[in-house]
Image (cartoon, grey):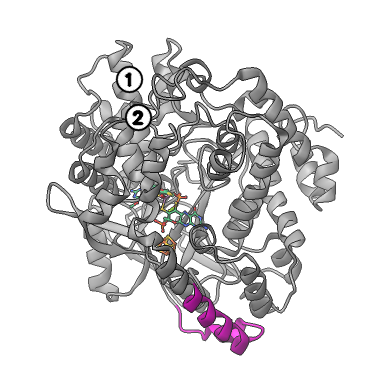
Amino acid sequence: MKGWNGKILRVNLSNKVYTSETFDEDFAKKWLGGRGFALKILWDELKPGIDPLGPENKLIIALGPISGITAPNMGKVVVAAKSPLTEGYGDGNIGSHIATQLRKAGYDALVVEGVSDEPTCLYIEDNKVNFLLVKDWWGKGTYKTLEFIQEKFGKNAAHLLIGQAGENLVRYAVIRSMEGRAGGRPGIGAVMGSKRLKAIVVKGTKVLSDIIAYPEKMKELGSQGMKKVKELDEKTRWTDQSTNAILSWCNDFDALPVKNFRKTSHPLSHQIDGVALSKARVETYGCPICVMKCGIAIRDDEDHISELDYENVGMLGANLEIFDLPAVGTLNYLCDDYGLDTISTGSVLGFYADVIEQELYAGKFKFGDSKEAKKLIKKISYREDVGDFLSEGTKRMSEKIGNNSHEFAMHVKGLEISAYNCKFCPGMALAFGTSGIGAHHKEAWVIMFELTEMERGSYDDKKAEKVIELQRIRGGLFEGIVSCRFPWIEEGFELDHYLDYLEATTGISFTFDNLWEIADRYYVLMRAFFAREFKEKWNRKRDYPPAMWFKDPIPNGKFAGKTLDWHKYDELLSAYYELRGWDARGIPKKITFEKLGMNDVSKELSKYIVLSS
Ligand code: PTT
Ligand code: SF4
């Protein structure tokens, strides 16, 4: 087999035993890598009902067949586990040198099991695993921990690490890498913390070309691709403003989250938009193996260097009505240092300010108060005072507060919604509703098509088709091969390149149809995971966005008065299920499992829930 090492490294932190397991080409072709490998391992190995923050959960780091090689934007890894926020499958995609080093160590995935007695750093050196006790790293932020790692293992050591939020089991703690990378929104950092695993460092010495089917061809394709992406970026100038270019667009189209998503635009939004960010740039961060580095870093109001991407600015700025870029930079820096997800943090704080304003909960935090927000971020990370309550996420907070507060707790399935306000974007609302891991824009960013190429207010079945098309590309192809999707989305680098790379690395001529079938398997298995957890409690309402988008109209501007329509959304959801071969509950039918070669999954799922034929 070429393209994959064909090996998974399994490490148990409880008894310090590690083993190497093999997989064959059938498994590789069926699941491809990254999200596919992580999903299949977690489905097969986790008993339903286990505590995501308990010893039985497993942390997976998974790579794809092109990960880590020199070709456009291949320096990414998938981090996954059962999510402490959603209780379903959760993952994230993060830039790290581990993409190359784990492959050079001879593995395509790492499975971490058990819990260590003491704070540990796993140091993987080819096929040797060292369990280093790092008591003095515990309790330290991600920047200090990075310093420790670089002192011990060298400046370019390939690593993943957590901050205090992960250690203290904040349900939306992320994993961090390098200066500005963060991934695993559904609380994968908390899973790492629950294992007392502070960091993972990997060093491999294998020659990567040995596992590539046509190394010379791949070398040529890779360098041509890197050159082309660089040229494209020079033309588009996308990295002048990077992801934050979208902020003024969202504001103009009434799709910006402002004041816990109650408003959709703000007259001061220009103070935190892409132009403002570009002017404030003092540094550019990015992932390894990338020629279009997109992390714009500014000096914040406490003199730190802080990387601001759109989601960070949208959720910690506009959503909290803080229109002061250096102040937003500080909130972001704190989230980065403690290892909190910025999207969930912005949503939790927005929800908190909202319930206080409505006198449903006592507190002194108000929209626009960046000083208090700073204090709260620290409290969340240490689970101190009210921080303990806030660290549970909006879903659990609203369940405690009651009083219909769930109607404006902005999450789907427990994962907080990222920075797109969908009061008048039915297609994007469907994308959030049906994302396999909860409300993440990474699965189907249909809003761009909905607002520029389709009739905005329509609930036409074409929107369900578009959501599925994008889920296949973004949540399937890019999460399976494990590569950054930005060359394709932002620079117009054609998808055919990835077929060429797959063929050169694996020797297999994949077609797009093959890849869409693999992607459909991911969506079926993510859904099966939820259904096995929730059993008869599963219902289609879990694929609905929060009631606020249906009940609370856009307050002003040219779309004033617009909301989503319950009945039409429900019909759009039915169209989506129909296209996917799922039943009216949103559970894949037996025939769908069969078509995708997943009878083993339907057999297992049938033990917990009756499947439709
Ligand atoms: C991603 C999510 C995003 S998506 C952003 S900004 W974005 C937030 N960034 C955070 C951050 O920063 N610090 C922090 N403490 N928390 C943060 N939470 C938020 O996390 C990221 C880029 C970006 S920037 C995006 S869209 C693209 N995402 C990709 C993806 O999902 N898949 C893929 N194949 N390619 C992608 N390329 C782009 O990567 P999660 P990164 Mg991130 C400071 O992982 O869990 O999906 O959360 O990985 O290396 O930082 O790159 O406007
Ligand atoms: Fe990382 Fe940005 Fe480059 Fe993608 S474009 S690989 S997110 S630096």
**Which quarter shows the N terminus?**
bottom right
Q: Which residue is drawn at 58% across and 39% down?
A: 450
Q: Nearer the viewer, residue 89 or 94?
A: 94
The residue indicated by pointer 2 is: 258
Q: In which quarter of the image is the C terminus?
A: top right
Local SS, label 1: helix
Extreme residue in the left direction: 302
Q: Residue 589, image x and y in percent?
A: 81, 37
Residue 341 visible in the current orientation: no
**Residue at mark 1:** 354
Magenta stretch bounds: 204-228
Q: In which quarter of the image is ligand 2?
A: bottom left
The residue shown at (32%, 49%) is 274
State the predominant SS element of the stretch in magenta: helix
Whether disc 2's CB lies below 8 Å from ligand 1 is answered no
Q: Which amino acid does the dot numbered 1 rest on?
A: Asp
Does dot 2 land on a helix, a strand or a loop?
Answer: loop
The three-letter code of the residue at mark 2 reads Val
**Residue 408, percent across and down?**
43, 21
